[in-house]
Protein backbone atom coordinates (compact mmCIF):
# COMPACT_ATOMS: atom_id res chain seq x y z
CA UNK A 1 0.00 0.00 0.00
CA UNK A 2 2.88 2.27 0.94
CA UNK A 3 4.66 1.68 -2.35
CA UNK A 4 1.39 2.33 -4.19
CA UNK A 5 1.16 5.76 -2.55
CA UNK A 6 4.73 6.53 -3.59
CA UNK A 7 3.96 5.35 -7.09
CA UNK A 8 0.98 7.68 -7.30
CA UNK A 9 3.13 10.56 -6.09
CA UNK A 10 5.73 9.91 -8.79
CA UNK A 11 3.09 9.64 -11.52
CA UNK A 12 1.55 12.90 -10.29
CA UNK A 13 4.92 14.65 -10.49
CA UNK A 14 5.58 13.28 -13.99
CA UNK A 15 2.16 14.50 -15.13
CA UNK A 16 2.79 17.95 -13.62
CA UNK A 17 6.18 18.21 -15.38
CA UNK A 18 4.64 17.18 -18.71
CA UNK A 19 1.81 19.70 -18.31
CA UNK A 20 4.18 22.55 -17.42
CA UNK A 21 6.53 21.48 -20.24
CA UNK A 22 3.69 21.58 -22.78
CA UNK A 23 2.79 25.07 -21.59
CA UNK A 24 6.38 26.34 -21.72
CA UNK A 25 7.27 24.82 -25.10
CA UNK A 26 5.89 27.67 -27.22
CA UNK A 27 7.67 30.23 -25.04
CA UNK A 28 11.07 28.84 -26.06
CA UNK A 29 10.90 30.72 -29.33
CA UNK A 30 10.00 33.94 -27.51
CA UNK A 31 13.04 34.13 -25.25
CA UNK A 32 15.29 35.38 -28.05
CA UNK A 33 14.39 38.95 -29.02
CA UNK A 34 12.78 39.00 -32.46
CA UNK A 35 14.97 40.59 -35.13
CA UNK A 36 13.07 43.64 -36.36
CA UNK A 37 15.19 44.91 -39.29
CA UNK A 38 14.23 47.77 -41.59
CA UNK A 39 10.87 49.41 -40.89
CA UNK A 40 8.50 49.65 -43.84
CA UNK A 41 5.34 51.70 -43.32
CA UNK A 42 2.21 50.80 -45.28
CA UNK A 43 -0.97 52.89 -45.20
CA UNK A 44 -4.23 50.94 -45.57
CA UNK A 45 -7.39 52.84 -46.46
CA UNK A 46 -10.55 52.54 -48.63
CA UNK A 47 -9.60 50.68 -50.81
CA UNK A 48 -5.87 50.68 -51.35
CA UNK A 49 -2.47 50.00 -49.87
CA UNK A 50 0.14 52.74 -50.11
CA UNK A 51 2.73 51.85 -51.35
CA UNK A 52 1.39 49.02 -53.49
CA UNK A 53 4.85 47.67 -54.26
CA UNK A 54 7.53 46.97 -51.69
CA UNK A 55 11.08 45.95 -52.57
CA UNK A 56 13.19 43.89 -50.18
CA UNK A 57 16.44 41.95 -50.52
CA UNK A 58 16.39 38.15 -50.49
CA UNK A 59 16.78 36.94 -46.91
CA UNK A 60 16.28 40.44 -45.46
CA UNK A 61 14.39 40.84 -42.19
CA UNK A 62 11.90 43.71 -42.19
CA UNK A 63 9.12 45.08 -40.00
CA UNK A 64 5.94 46.10 -41.77
CA UNK A 65 4.09 48.80 -39.85
CA UNK A 66 0.58 48.86 -41.29
CA UNK A 67 -1.36 51.99 -40.39
CA UNK A 68 -5.11 52.11 -41.00
CA UNK A 69 -5.75 55.65 -42.24
CA UNK A 70 -9.31 54.82 -43.30
CA UNK A 71 -12.70 54.82 -41.57
CA UNK A 72 -13.33 51.03 -41.43
CA UNK A 73 -11.38 47.86 -40.49
CA UNK A 74 -8.72 46.55 -42.85
CA UNK A 75 -6.55 43.45 -42.93
CA UNK A 76 -3.03 42.68 -44.01
CA UNK A 77 -2.07 39.15 -45.00
CA UNK A 78 -0.19 37.14 -47.59
CA UNK A 79 -0.67 33.46 -48.33
CA UNK A 80 2.27 33.63 -50.77
CA UNK A 81 4.65 35.12 -48.20
CA UNK A 82 3.16 33.12 -45.29
CA UNK A 83 2.12 36.25 -43.39
CA UNK A 84 -0.82 35.43 -41.11
CA UNK A 85 -3.87 37.68 -41.18
CA UNK A 86 -3.78 40.76 -38.97
CA UNK A 87 -6.76 43.09 -38.52
CA UNK A 88 -6.12 46.83 -38.15
CA UNK A 89 -8.94 48.94 -36.63
CA UNK A 90 -9.37 52.48 -38.02
CA UNK A 91 -6.75 54.91 -36.72
CA UNK A 92 -4.59 52.10 -35.30
CA UNK A 93 -1.44 50.33 -36.47
CA UNK A 94 -0.12 46.75 -36.40
CA UNK A 95 3.43 45.44 -36.75
CA UNK A 96 4.44 42.33 -38.69
CA UNK A 97 8.01 41.03 -38.53
CA UNK A 98 8.95 39.14 -41.67
CA UNK A 99 12.02 37.49 -43.14
CA UNK A 100 12.13 37.54 -46.93
CA UNK A 101 12.76 34.17 -48.58
CA UNK A 102 16.21 33.48 -50.02
CA UNK A 103 14.63 32.94 -53.44
CA UNK A 104 13.74 36.10 -55.44
CA UNK A 105 10.12 36.43 -56.50
CA UNK A 106 6.87 38.37 -56.13
CA UNK A 107 4.55 37.85 -53.20
CA UNK A 108 1.02 39.28 -53.21
CA UNK A 109 -0.51 40.76 -50.04
CA UNK A 110 -4.18 41.61 -49.65
CA UNK A 111 -6.95 42.83 -47.38
CA UNK A 112 -9.11 39.73 -47.15
CA UNK A 113 -12.27 41.40 -45.81
CA UNK A 114 -15.25 40.79 -48.12
CA UNK A 115 -15.04 42.98 -51.23
CA UNK A 116 -11.86 44.83 -50.24
CA UNK A 117 -9.51 42.83 -52.44
CA UNK A 118 -11.77 43.20 -55.45
CA UNK A 119 -12.02 46.95 -54.77
CA UNK A 120 -8.23 47.24 -55.09
CA UNK A 121 -6.72 46.38 -51.72
CA UNK A 122 -3.86 44.32 -53.13
CA UNK A 123 -0.12 44.87 -53.27
CA UNK A 124 3.05 42.94 -53.83
CA UNK A 125 6.37 42.40 -52.14
CA UNK A 126 9.18 42.09 -54.68
CA UNK A 127 12.10 40.06 -53.36
CA UNK A 128 15.35 40.64 -55.27
CA UNK B 1 -0.19 23.64 -27.69
CA UNK B 2 -1.48 22.99 -24.17
CA UNK B 3 -4.92 22.81 -25.77
CA UNK B 4 -3.81 19.96 -28.07
CA UNK B 5 -2.16 18.16 -25.13
CA UNK B 6 -5.22 18.41 -22.86
CA UNK B 7 -7.63 17.39 -25.64
CA UNK B 8 -5.71 14.24 -26.60
CA UNK B 9 -4.89 13.40 -22.96
CA UNK B 10 -8.52 13.56 -21.90
CA UNK B 11 -10.09 11.99 -24.98
CA UNK B 12 -7.29 9.41 -25.14
CA UNK B 13 -7.78 8.40 -21.52
CA UNK B 14 -11.55 8.16 -22.06
CA UNK B 15 -10.91 5.82 -24.99
CA UNK B 16 -8.30 3.84 -23.00
CA UNK B 17 -10.74 3.40 -20.09
CA UNK B 18 -13.44 2.20 -22.47
CA UNK B 19 -11.07 -0.35 -24.05
CA UNK B 20 -10.02 -1.39 -20.55
CA UNK B 21 -13.65 -1.97 -19.50
CA UNK B 22 -14.30 -4.06 -22.64
CA UNK B 23 -11.16 -6.20 -22.22
CA UNK B 24 -11.68 -6.70 -18.48
CA UNK B 25 -15.27 -7.76 -19.07
CA UNK B 26 -14.26 -10.30 -21.75
CA UNK B 27 -11.76 -11.79 -19.27
CA UNK B 28 -14.43 -11.90 -16.58
CA UNK B 29 -16.90 -13.79 -18.74
CA UNK B 30 -14.08 -16.07 -19.94
CA UNK B 31 -14.19 -15.06 -23.60
CA UNK B 32 -10.61 -13.94 -24.18
CA UNK B 33 -10.87 -14.88 -27.87
CA UNK B 34 -12.88 -11.67 -28.28
CA UNK B 35 -9.85 -9.55 -27.31
CA UNK B 36 -8.63 -9.48 -30.91
CA UNK B 37 -11.99 -8.22 -32.14
CA UNK B 38 -11.90 -5.38 -29.59
CA UNK B 39 -8.41 -4.37 -30.78
CA UNK B 40 -9.46 -4.67 -34.44
CA UNK B 41 -12.43 -2.37 -33.78
CA UNK B 42 -10.19 0.03 -31.87
CA UNK B 43 -7.59 0.21 -34.64
CA UNK B 44 -10.29 0.74 -37.27
CA UNK B 45 -11.73 3.58 -35.15
CA UNK B 46 -8.32 5.24 -34.77
CA UNK B 47 -7.76 4.93 -38.53
CA UNK B 48 -11.17 6.45 -39.28
CA UNK B 49 -10.51 9.34 -36.85
CA UNK B 50 -7.15 10.12 -38.46
CA UNK B 51 -8.79 10.00 -41.88
CA UNK B 52 -11.63 12.27 -40.66
CA UNK B 53 -9.15 14.81 -39.25
CA UNK B 54 -7.11 14.72 -42.46
CA UNK B 55 -10.21 15.31 -44.62
CA UNK B 56 -11.31 18.36 -42.55
CA UNK B 57 -7.73 19.68 -42.64
CA UNK B 58 -7.36 19.21 -46.41
CA UNK B 59 -10.79 20.73 -47.00
CA UNK B 60 -9.70 23.88 -45.14
CA UNK B 61 -6.55 23.98 -47.30
CA UNK B 62 -8.64 24.05 -50.48
CA UNK B 63 -10.69 27.07 -49.42
CA UNK B 64 -9.78 30.74 -49.38
CA UNK B 65 -11.32 34.14 -48.66
CA UNK B 66 -14.88 34.28 -47.38
CA UNK B 67 -15.48 30.55 -47.78
CA UNK B 68 -12.45 29.80 -45.62
CA UNK B 69 -13.63 32.22 -42.90
CA UNK B 70 -17.08 30.61 -42.99
CA UNK B 71 -15.61 27.11 -42.83
CA UNK B 72 -13.24 28.02 -39.99
CA UNK B 73 -15.92 29.83 -37.99
CA UNK B 74 -18.41 26.99 -38.55
CA UNK B 75 -15.87 24.32 -37.55
CA UNK B 76 -14.99 26.22 -34.37
CA UNK B 77 -18.63 26.69 -33.33
CA UNK B 78 -19.42 23.03 -34.10
CA UNK B 79 -16.43 21.99 -31.99
CA UNK B 80 -17.63 24.21 -29.11
CA UNK B 81 -21.14 22.72 -29.30
CA UNK B 82 -19.87 19.12 -29.27
CA UNK B 83 -17.21 19.87 -26.65
CA UNK B 84 -19.85 21.40 -24.36
CA UNK B 85 -22.24 18.49 -24.84
CA UNK B 86 -19.44 15.98 -24.29
CA UNK B 87 -18.17 17.61 -21.08
CA UNK B 88 -21.65 17.81 -19.53
CA UNK B 89 -22.67 14.35 -20.78
CA UNK B 90 -19.51 12.79 -19.34
CA UNK B 91 -20.11 14.48 -16.00
CA UNK B 92 -23.65 13.10 -15.76
CA UNK B 93 -23.29 9.70 -17.43
CA UNK B 94 -19.81 8.54 -16.39
CA UNK B 95 -21.15 6.36 -13.58
CA UNK B 96 -23.49 4.44 -15.91
CA UNK B 97 -20.91 3.99 -18.69
CA UNK B 98 -19.43 0.72 -17.42
CA UNK B 99 -22.80 -1.03 -17.06
CA UNK B 100 -23.91 0.19 -20.48
CA UNK B 101 -20.73 -1.04 -22.17
CA UNK B 102 -21.02 -4.45 -20.50
CA UNK B 103 -24.62 -4.69 -21.65
CA UNK B 104 -23.55 -4.00 -25.23
CA UNK B 105 -20.81 -6.64 -25.03
CA UNK B 106 -23.39 -9.14 -23.73
CA UNK B 107 -25.60 -8.47 -26.73
CA UNK B 108 -22.64 -8.81 -29.12
CA UNK B 109 -21.62 -12.12 -27.51
CA UNK B 110 -25.20 -13.39 -27.66
CA UNK B 111 -25.20 -12.76 -31.40
CA UNK B 112 -22.03 -14.88 -31.61
CA UNK B 113 -20.48 -12.49 -34.08
CA UNK B 114 -16.90 -11.26 -33.81
CA UNK B 115 -17.84 -8.39 -36.07
CA UNK B 116 -20.55 -7.29 -33.61
CA UNK B 117 -17.97 -7.27 -30.82
CA UNK B 118 -15.50 -5.30 -32.94
CA UNK B 119 -18.34 -2.91 -33.79
CA UNK B 120 -18.89 -2.14 -30.09
CA UNK B 121 -15.23 -1.10 -29.74
CA UNK B 122 -15.34 0.70 -33.08
CA UNK B 123 -18.35 2.87 -32.22
CA UNK B 124 -17.33 3.85 -28.69
CA UNK B 125 -13.64 4.48 -29.49
CA UNK B 126 -14.57 6.07 -32.83
CA UNK B 127 -16.78 8.59 -31.04
CA UNK B 128 -13.84 9.74 -28.92
CA UNK B 129 -11.58 9.73 -31.99
CA UNK B 130 -13.84 11.84 -34.20
CA UNK B 131 -14.35 14.30 -31.34
CA UNK B 132 -10.58 14.54 -30.90
CA UNK B 133 -10.06 15.09 -34.64
CA UNK B 134 -12.67 17.87 -34.72
CA UNK B 135 -11.29 19.64 -31.61
CA UNK B 136 -7.71 19.42 -32.88
CA UNK B 137 -8.56 20.76 -36.33
CA UNK B 138 -10.67 23.59 -34.82
CA UNK B 139 -7.81 24.53 -32.46
CA UNK B 140 -5.14 24.29 -35.17
CA UNK B 141 -6.87 27.06 -37.18
CA UNK B 142 -5.42 29.53 -34.64
CA UNK B 143 -2.20 27.72 -33.68
CA UNK B 144 1.10 29.37 -34.54
CA UNK B 145 3.37 26.36 -35.02
CA UNK B 146 1.92 23.31 -36.73
CA UNK B 147 4.75 21.00 -35.69
CA UNK B 148 4.71 21.93 -31.98
CA UNK B 149 0.90 21.63 -31.99
CA UNK B 150 1.03 18.15 -33.54
CA UNK B 151 3.78 17.04 -31.12
CA UNK B 152 1.74 18.28 -28.13
CA UNK B 153 -1.25 16.32 -29.44
CA UNK B 154 0.85 13.17 -29.87
CA UNK B 155 2.35 13.62 -26.39
CA UNK B 156 -1.14 13.86 -24.85
CA UNK B 157 -2.23 10.70 -26.67
CA UNK B 158 0.96 8.89 -25.60
CA UNK B 159 0.54 9.82 -21.93
CA UNK B 160 -3.14 8.79 -22.12
CA UNK B 161 -2.20 5.38 -23.57
CA UNK B 162 0.44 4.87 -20.84
CA UNK B 163 -1.95 5.88 -18.05
CA UNK B 164 -4.68 3.69 -19.57
CA UNK B 165 -2.32 0.70 -19.65
CA UNK B 166 -1.15 1.22 -16.05
CA UNK B 167 -4.75 1.62 -14.86
CA UNK B 168 -5.76 -1.57 -16.68
CA UNK B 169 -2.86 -3.52 -15.19
CA UNK B 170 -3.95 -2.28 -11.79
CA UNK B 171 -0.46 -0.90 -11.12
CA UNK B 172 -1.75 2.65 -10.92
CA UNK B 173 -4.58 4.20 -8.99
CA UNK B 174 -5.70 7.57 -10.31
CA UNK B 175 -8.40 9.78 -8.89
CA UNK B 176 -10.35 9.68 -12.16
CA UNK B 177 -13.11 11.95 -10.87
CA UNK B 178 -10.50 14.63 -10.09
CA UNK B 179 -8.79 14.07 -13.47
CA UNK B 180 -12.04 14.50 -15.42
CA UNK B 181 -13.14 17.46 -13.28
CA UNK B 182 -9.84 19.33 -13.82
CA UNK B 183 -9.63 18.60 -17.55
CA UNK B 184 -13.34 19.43 -17.82
CA UNK B 185 -12.80 22.92 -16.40
CA UNK B 186 -9.73 23.40 -18.65
CA UNK B 187 -11.73 22.35 -21.71
CA UNK B 188 -14.55 24.78 -20.81
CA UNK B 189 -11.98 27.62 -20.65
CA UNK B 190 -10.51 26.54 -24.02
CA UNK B 191 -14.00 26.18 -25.54
CA UNK B 192 -14.79 29.78 -24.54
CA UNK B 193 -11.68 30.88 -26.46
CA UNK B 194 -12.68 28.75 -29.44
CA UNK B 195 -16.14 30.35 -29.35
CA UNK B 196 -14.66 33.88 -29.38
CA UNK B 197 -12.38 32.90 -32.30
CA UNK B 198 -15.30 31.36 -34.21
CA UNK B 199 -17.45 34.46 -33.66
CA UNK B 200 -14.59 36.61 -35.00
CA UNK B 201 -14.33 34.55 -38.20
CA UNK B 202 -18.09 34.76 -38.82
CA UNK B 203 -18.04 38.47 -38.02
CA UNK B 204 -15.45 39.06 -40.75
CA UNK B 205 -17.81 37.68 -43.39
CA UNK B 206 -20.78 39.56 -41.94
CA UNK B 207 -22.70 36.49 -40.71
CA UNK B 208 -22.53 37.65 -37.09
CA UNK B 209 -22.81 41.35 -36.15
CA UNK B 210 -19.99 42.83 -34.05
CA UNK B 211 -22.43 45.38 -32.49
CA UNK B 212 -19.49 47.50 -31.30
CA UNK B 213 -16.65 46.66 -33.70
CA UNK B 214 -13.82 47.18 -31.18
CA UNK B 215 -14.55 47.52 -27.47
CA UNK B 216 -10.89 48.22 -26.61
CA UNK B 217 -7.40 47.89 -28.13
CA UNK B 218 -4.66 46.32 -26.03
CA UNK B 219 -2.27 45.78 -28.95
CA UNK B 220 0.37 48.10 -27.46
CA UNK B 221 0.32 46.05 -24.25
CA UNK B 222 0.30 42.60 -25.86
CA UNK B 223 0.44 42.09 -29.62
CA UNK B 224 -2.00 39.38 -30.71
CA UNK B 225 0.22 38.51 -33.68
CA UNK B 226 3.31 37.84 -31.52
CA UNK B 227 4.25 34.30 -30.40
CA UNK B 228 2.76 34.75 -26.94
CA UNK B 229 -0.26 36.57 -28.37
CA UNK B 230 -0.98 33.68 -30.74
CA UNK B 231 -0.61 31.17 -27.91
CA UNK B 232 -3.11 33.16 -25.83
CA UNK B 233 -5.38 33.41 -28.89
CA UNK B 234 -5.41 29.61 -29.23
CA UNK B 235 -5.96 28.96 -25.52
CA UNK B 236 -8.19 31.83 -24.45
CA UNK B 237 -9.34 33.48 -27.69
CA UNK B 238 -7.16 36.54 -27.01
CA UNK B 239 -7.85 39.35 -29.48
CA UNK B 240 -6.22 42.77 -28.95
CA UNK B 241 -9.31 44.59 -30.22
CA UNK B 242 -12.38 42.35 -29.77
CA UNK B 243 -15.93 43.27 -30.69
CA UNK B 244 -18.73 43.45 -28.14
CA UNK B 245 -20.16 40.18 -29.53
CA UNK B 246 -16.84 38.41 -28.95
CA UNK B 247 -16.56 39.72 -25.38
CA UNK B 248 -20.17 38.84 -24.51
CA UNK B 249 -19.88 35.38 -26.13
CA UNK B 250 -16.63 34.64 -24.26
CA UNK B 251 -17.63 35.75 -20.79
CA UNK B 252 -21.26 34.62 -21.16
CA UNK B 253 -20.21 31.10 -22.16
CA UNK B 254 -17.46 30.89 -19.54
CA UNK B 255 -19.67 32.06 -16.67
CA UNK B 256 -22.69 29.98 -17.76
CA UNK B 257 -20.82 26.73 -18.38
CA UNK B 258 -18.61 26.99 -15.30
CA UNK B 259 -21.70 27.60 -13.15
CA UNK B 260 -23.45 24.50 -14.59
CA UNK B 261 -20.30 22.36 -14.41
CA UNK B 262 -19.25 23.36 -10.91
CA UNK B 263 -22.80 22.82 -9.63
CA UNK B 264 -22.66 19.31 -11.11
CA UNK B 265 -19.41 18.67 -9.21
CA UNK B 266 -21.00 19.44 -5.82
CA UNK B 267 -21.79 16.28 -3.80
CA UNK B 268 -25.27 17.59 -2.90
CA UNK B 269 -26.23 17.62 -6.58
CA UNK B 270 -25.36 13.96 -6.99
CA UNK B 271 -28.02 11.29 -6.63
CA UNK B 272 -27.45 8.36 -4.28
CA UNK B 273 -24.57 6.09 -5.28
CA UNK B 274 -25.37 3.65 -8.01
CA UNK B 275 -23.85 0.21 -8.15
CA UNK B 276 -22.23 0.73 -11.55
Image: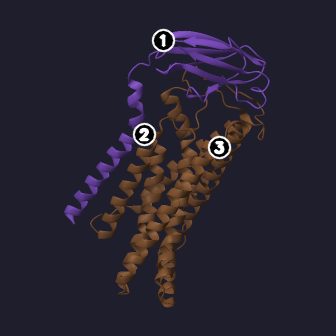
Chain colours: A purple, B brown
Q: Which residue is mark 3?
A: B72
Query: What crowding class fits label 2: few (fewer than 14 Cα within 10 Å), some (14-19), or many (20 or more)?
Result: some
Q: Residue at x 51, y 76 (%)?
A: B119
The alpha-carbon separation of the residues under discs 3 and 1 comes to 33 Å
Quarter where residue A53 is shown: top right
The residue positioned 37% from the left and 60% from the top of the image is B161
- Residue A37 marker: 1
Query: In this rendering, does residue B274 appear at all?
Result: no
Label 2 residue SS: helix
- Mark 1 neighbour density, 10 Å: few (under 14) some (14–19) many (20 or more): some
Which is more toward the observer, A18 or B147? B147
What is the x, y in percent for residue A85?
62, 29
Answer yes or no: are tags 1 and 2 on the same subunit: no
Image coords of residue B228 (percent x, y):
48, 29
Label 3 and label 1 in one chain:
no
Question: What residue is shown at x 73% (from left), y 13% (from top)?
Answer: A69
Relative vertical location of residue B112 with respect to residue A116 in this rendering, above or below = below
State the separation of the CA atoms marked 1 and 2. 26 Å
Q: Along the horizontal axis of the image, is B207 left or right of B134? A: right
Which residue occupies the foreground of this view, B90 or B114? B114
Amino acid sequence: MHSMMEYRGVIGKILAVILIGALMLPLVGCTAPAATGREIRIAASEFKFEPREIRVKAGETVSFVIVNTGMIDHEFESDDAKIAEVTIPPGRQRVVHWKAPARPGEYAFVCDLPGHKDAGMVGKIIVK
Amino acid sequence: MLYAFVVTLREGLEAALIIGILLAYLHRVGYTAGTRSVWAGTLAAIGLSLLGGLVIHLLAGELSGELLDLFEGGTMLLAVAILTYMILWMQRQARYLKAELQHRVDRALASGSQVALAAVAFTVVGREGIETALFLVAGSLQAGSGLAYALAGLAGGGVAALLGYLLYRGSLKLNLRLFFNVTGVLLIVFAAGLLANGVKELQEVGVVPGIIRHVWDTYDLLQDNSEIGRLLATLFGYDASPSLTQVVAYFGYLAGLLAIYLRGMMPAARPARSGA
